[in-house]
Amino acid sequence: MIPFISRADLAEQNIWIKHLSAAMPNEVIVPFADLTAEQKQLCEIAIVANPDPQDLLSLPSLKWVHSVWAGVERMINELSSPSFSIVRLVDSNLAETMSEAVLAWTLFLHRDMPRYAKQQTLQSWVQQPMVRAQDRRIGVLGLGELGRVSAQRLVANGFSVAGWSRNPKQVEGVECFHGEEGLIPLLNQSDILVCLLPLTMETKGLLNHQNLSCLPVGASIINFARGLIIDDEALLAKLDQGNLSHAVLDVFMQEPLPINHSFWLHDSITVLPHISAPTHPVSASEIVATNIKQYRLTGNIPPTIDMLRGY
């Protein structure tokens, strides 16, 4: 028996359990709330989506948990030193979905859609100069699976693309920077900066006043990573001063974004409700099923999270 542990509402939990059960007909997937005290003592595996850490800690035999999400930083932050391993979702479909969103919103900024929207409110018929894709410099922060696929999709659409990562990476067609010494050169040449970094102690607040000041005047930002990577006040100041032209934000320090937050009505910010790369229950369930089946056969746990790095 494998519990599904989540703080989502019951309807959403039931959707996940339905798809997970269909993908694993030889396993019994149940809501955590349905476990008896005896069953809790025996659980070796749990499938999770933003679980309550106390629920996990109530399973003394737990060896590993499989998240149905790619992001697991909240779980890591809430569990100081778990006795079990954490496996995050690695879904190639997720990378393709993210790259689609990155391309769409890069084109939105590249073709001056925010400016034309403002012109419409003023009934202003002005044709802005067009910049060729090869002359638009895109910087991608984070060259993991999501960043790599997104950068390659931008290259395929004719953009000049550079990327930055913690450690050296090579991506065909992409100028790659790495480490502390590589961040500022990347920022200096990014007309549009796309953030796809994991949230770690090193990346929290990375896009602060100092680093945002390294972007070219008039640059734009797309944040599809985590809200805590950007300093909200520094971003607002740069937008209000005209140093940055626009920000497309899909993630925030608090979600849902509070109704009274200044981002909602700011004419240089596009607010999205965390939709850039939603996890699809069907493909995610198939991946989880494959990993659990392999574990049953071999006893080998899939690649796990490095708790020190945070991913």
Image (cartoon, rainbow, N blue to C red):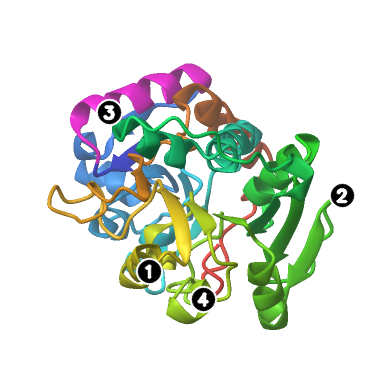
Left or right for 153, reference 293:
right
Q: How far from the left and from the top, in percent, is residue 24? A: 51, 23
Instruction: Report how far apart the C-alphas of labels 3 and 1 lie in the structure.
Output: 43 Å
Q: Which residue shows up at 67% across the image and 48% down it?
A: 145
Q: Which quarter of the figure is the C terminus placed in? A: bottom right
> Which of label 4 and label 1 is nearer to you?
1
Tell whether label 1 touches label 2 (CB within 8 Å): no
Q: How far from the left and from the top, in percent, is residue 302? A: 63, 49
Q: Which residue is mark 3?
A: 12
Instruction: Report how far apart the C-alphas of labels 2 and 1 lie in the structure.
Output: 36 Å
Residue 213 numbered tag:
4
Q: Which residue is mark 2?
A: 172
- What kind of element bears circle 2? loop
Q: Nearer the viewer, residue 302 or 42?
A: 302
Q: Nearer the viewer, residue 138 or 168?
A: 138
Amino acid type, residue under disc 4 in the picture: Ser
Q: Residues within 10 Å of mark 3 (few under 14, many from 20)?
A: few
- What kind of element bears circle 4? loop
